[in-house]
Image (cartoon, coloured by chain):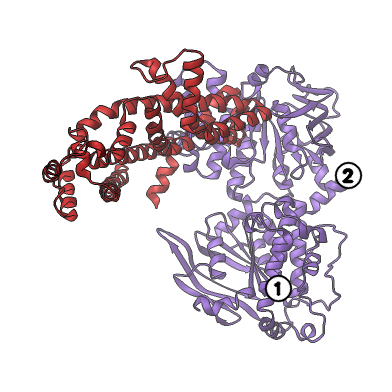
Amino acid sequence: MTPAAPLLRWLLLRLGGVVFVLWAVSTVTFFAIRLIPGDPAEAIVGGPGSEASADALADARAEYGLDQPLLLQYLRFLGRLASLDLGRSYALHQSVASVIADTLPPTLGLAVVALSVAVVIALAVAAWSVRGGRAASAVASFLEVVAAAVPHFWLAILGIVLFSTALGWLPPVSVPGPSGLILPALTLAVPLAGFLGQVMREALLDAMSSPFALSARARGENENGVFWRHALRHSAIPAIGLAGWAFGSLLSGAVVVETIFARPGLGRSLLQAVQGRDVPLVVGVVIVVALGYMLVTTATDLAERLIDPRLAARAVSR
Amino acid sequence: MSPRVAGSPVVSPQMVRPLVEVGALTVRFARQETPAVAGISFDIEPGECVGLVGESGSGKSVTARALLGLASGACVDADMLRFGDTDLRGLSRSRWRALRGSAGGIGYIPQAALVGLDPLRPVGREIADTLRLHTRASAAERAARVIELLTAVGMPEPELRAGQRPYELSGGLRQRALIASAIALGPRLLIADEPTTALDSTVQAGILDLLHHLQSEGTAILLISHDLAVVSRLASRVAVMQAGSLVEFGPTRRVLDAPQHPYTRRLVAAVPTSQPRGRRLSPSALPVALPVALPVYTPPVAEPTAPPREIVLEARGLSRRFGERQAVDSVSFTLGRGETLGIVGESGSGKTTLARLVLALEHPDAGEVRLFGEEWSTSPEGQRRSRRPLIGAIYQDALSSFDPRLTAGQILGDALRVGAGVGEAAAVETATRTPASRAAGGDNPWRTDLAGLLDAVHLPQATATRRPRFLSGGQQQRVAIARAIAARPAIIVCDEPVSSLDVSVQAQILDLLDDLQSTLGLSYLFITHDLGVVRHASDDVLVMKDGRVLESGPTETVFSAPTADYTRALLAAAPEVSS
């Protein structure tokens, strides 16, 4: 057996799973959004308040195929999906793909910056507390619980009041450029850092007091060496395991943060699409998010195997 | 053994200065009333091996750590703490680090060989770290030296092994890698903390040979062990610790042959190998004390001419395969009432699978197990269930076999209820399968109440309210034994019941099992890798390797005249106290 074979098989299985999940997610979304009372045709001609004429509504229905039976609509929808066509947004009158292409990059940028900041904060607090003894541990643990429990909207408002209104250092709404990114990124990063810090600190403490850390010290390794060469790697495994969840937390956080800071992005588009009953856009965003989820979990699984080959050995022998 | 056994290095005035001198060393942990180490003094000559013996918690490892400056969180105090020309008292952190693992410094093999290496790094990197920390060797030079070192410690295929992670190596190979990392730069002193614990006896022998070889090349060794047999193989002098104090320090032969301190005498007497079957190992003041006076049942083994042997358990051609591996391969044996059948073998020899087959927790691929002459392994579980109390089990890790939320009393209460549930049915059966003398009178030796059960295993009544986690290892095993006998079994499967216990505690548990066997007429299937224990505890023995029985017969016959090469190798590898 070549060593690549089990990995390839694993990847193929994953791919099959991805296709299945995408179908399930889009189907559920397609039907769920129709359960919201109201007429999608109104959304097409300008929203619920537009008082469009009956003719205009009928034209819109005919144009978007809404006068067909629901099952037929669903099959058409699936057919378009299979050819990678996400359809046209009702409200924005442009293709869903182009809406997503416009709004995904700023959200991804925000998520990556927020995740990096969260890792740095979590690592700094964990590293300090692991070497600071019992009191430092208690302080760090308290900070982490508070950070993890704080809701995004409250943090965002606090940040605006403190840094924009009172101190005037940062803009209250997101402006292009780095200064506009600071508050939204921090808002997303702080709760995430709380969760990451908790699991990393636990693993670090474990590793620093483990027999292999004692072996390292007996070799003449100093505390920095034990931390960077041994303990850090052990804390990375649970932290990476959390990354899939973190991705979800960042996206749901993005909905809130992008709305509060009036920042263009996927989260805000999703909120507007749901409010305006813009079925194609909602389905499109949900599919992209689900795809992202699965990419992240696959990447974290691979990363864990790379760090701890025991996992790969176990998975193969099963 | 080293030639320096002869003579007494301590008194000789023109001897070279000792390499290590420890005077009145005291180590105290915060929040603890008594010091972990209380004013001990000893010395180590250059190139000498000194053994440090004592039970867990006696302060051996703390002493070792004090010599390395690694007694973290402790307050170390000494009149004298010298290594070579260095006064170790008040040494700065960086000077401590320069000493650890360096050329002419102190190497350390930590306890727990199996987890002493970082599981996420290749072992070669761990060894290279010693070189990186103390020399300016380039990465290529380090890699080359790692291969040399692995070869020197007897690692097969060193190039391959250097790139592997600990989980890919056996326990013995991991220990060799740890030794390589400790001796990489040629320390003058090597501290080995329980270097052979948790290793099979043939592997143990190899590690001891390696340590002996290092010593013959001039490295002084402080050998820490709870096992007198291991220490007596290498050490020219032995220091015995008890509860933080040094109770005896002198030449190995003198300490073993004529121990001065009562504790040392107890320790020497407790080594099972040195005592034949039936001899009590612990000088416990408690007699064979079951709470009720009862006529003592004499197991048939004591008199071979006594009533015909009653077979309680029989295995016929048992086989079990797991994937590629034949775990158990056509094993047959019989176990008579009141007898003990020992099953020896190294890890992976199929002992535990055999136990699970006997307990009908695992289904055999071929063969069958019969209980009291009736179908057992071939019965459907529904028919087996009512007879399950007939076979009890105790395991090596008693603690993990308990529900952590229950107190000892609740655990035993549950077991008693199971016993009572089948009690009425079993009582009839008990009457038929126990000697008339016992069943007739009201003197039923089976205690059906909690208090009686605790008495039977010599536990204080207060134990009932405590959770097992807060009991000592010996007490935990006693609770496990009490739980096993609560359901009134005829047979107990003992899977390494004393392997993780200190010798003197081990002795008490073995004595307790002996007492219960003679009062309750129990039969034991006694599984262990420890030849000393099996020799002491069993009437017959079964030697297993790779799932097959290599040899079987009466224990003394097998041990005094082994016919299989493997048995001979096992016996030769087992450390014994005699030289």
**Mark 2 surroundings: few (<14), some (14-19) or many (≥20) residues within 10 A:** some
**At which x and y percent is residue B456?**
79, 67
Q: Nearer the viewer, residue B97 or B343?
A: B97
Does residue B539 sit above or below A136 in this rendering?
Answer: below
Mark nearest the camera among 1 and 2 is 1
Residue A108 appears in the picture as rendered: yes
3D distance between C-alphas at marks 1 and 2: 38 Å
Residue B124 appears in the picture as rendered: no
**Image check: B312 left or right of B292?**
left
**Image check: B195 left or right of B147?**
right
Give the letter of the chain under mark 1.
B
| Residue ID at (81%, 25%) | B77
Q: Colour of chain A?
A: red
Give the label on residue B522, or none: 1
Query: Residue at label 2?
Result: B260
Q: Colour of chain B?
A: purple
